[in-house]
């Protein structure tokens, strides 16, 4: 892709330089015919030689610019709202956090493992309890980390309002990890409406008996007391 695009641009520059040189030569020939070849032979040759050097210089300069300039189509990017990186044999793709209140969120990310072994990936972030660490297993191929998957990362106390960026650190094995600035999004979009954190269950209270309403035990007859006579 790179060589092809460079060749097209270089060829276009060479064509323009050649056309300019041809027009200059045509003008010199016309002047030579009008004033005589002997009078203009030396100046014409000198100007033609200069035009050739100029054309070659323009072509080389244009080609050099194309060789140095980086093509945007060769850059790897995530075609979505998330961010990504590559750590050794692990590719992190489209990482984002879905949170509606800026306190509890879920990590959404795709892990691409190019090995034939399961990679234990450590995920670290700052929460209300300090530096928090979680671990997910990236199987060979693709692993989707999301709340409805077998691999999920719940983020509590992150203090990151929607629209901000939260630093998240990824690392596995002996590879040097990377910290990504992961965007925080809400579930307002339909695509993210089912990716919000599961609500924390509210503990239920077991009703207890009121001591004031507890029935008093019935008194039994005192020993030795006569039973009432039957009528």
Image (cartoon, rainbow, N blue to C red):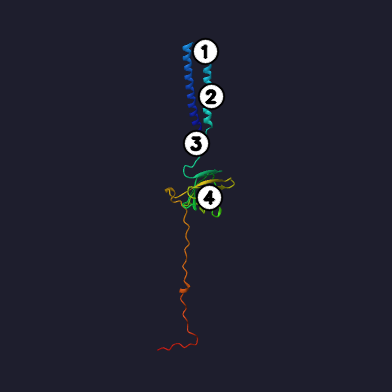
Give the residue drawn at x 50%, y 11%: 37
Q: Residue 57: which numbered mark, if any?
A: 2
Q: Is residue 143 visible?
A: no
From what the image shows, is residue 88 above or below residue 27? below
- Looking at marks 2 and 1 on the same chain, the residue that comes earlier in the sequence is marked by 1
Q: Name the residue under label 1.
A: 41
**Neighbour tally class for label 1: few under 14, some 14-19, many 20 plus, Cα within 10 Å:** few
Secondary structure at badge 4 equals strand
Q: Is residue 63 visible?
A: yes
Marks 1 and 3: which is nearer the front?
1
Is 197 placed left or right of 88 in the picture?
Answer: left
Give the residue drawn at x 49%, y 29%: 9
Q: How far is disc 4 from disc 1 in space, using C-alphas?
A: 81 Å
Q: Residue 72: which numbered mark, if any?
A: 3
At which x and y percent is residue 8?
48, 29
Contact (CB < 8 A) between labels 1 and 3? no
Q: Name the residue under label 4.
A: 137
Q: Residue furthest toward the left?
A: 231
Marks 4 and 2: which is nearer the front?
2
Secondary structure at badge 3 equals helix
């Amino acid at each position: 892709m790179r060589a092809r695009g460079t060749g097209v641009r270089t060829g276009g520059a060479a064509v323009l330089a050649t056309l300019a040189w041809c027009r200059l030569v045509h003008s010199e020939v016309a002047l030579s015919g009008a004033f005589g070849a002997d009078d203009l032979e030396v100046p014409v040759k000198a100007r033609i030689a200069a035009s050739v050097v100029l054309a070659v210089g323009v072509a080389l300069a244009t080609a050099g610019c194309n060789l140095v300039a980086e093509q945007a189509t060769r850059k790897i990017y995530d075609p979505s709202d998330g961010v990504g990186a590559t750590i050794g044999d692990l590719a992190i793709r489209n990482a984002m956090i879905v949170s509606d209140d800026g306190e509890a969120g879920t990590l959404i990310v795709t892990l691409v493992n190019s090995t034939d072994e399961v990679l234990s990936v450590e995920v670290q972030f700052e929460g209300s309890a300090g530096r928090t660490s979680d671990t997910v297993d990236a199987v060979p191929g693709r692993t989707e980390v999301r709340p409805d998957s077998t691999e999920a990362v719940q983020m509590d106390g992150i203090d990151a309002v929607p629209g901000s960026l939260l630093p998240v650190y990824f690392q596995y094995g002996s590879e040097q990890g990377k910290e990504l600035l992961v965007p925080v999004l809400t579930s307002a979009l339909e695509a993210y409406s089912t990716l919000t954190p599961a609500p924390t269950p509210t503990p239920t209270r077991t009703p207890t008996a009121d001591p004031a309403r507890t029935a008093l035990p019935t008194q039994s007859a005192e020993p030795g007391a006569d039973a009432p006579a039957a009528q």
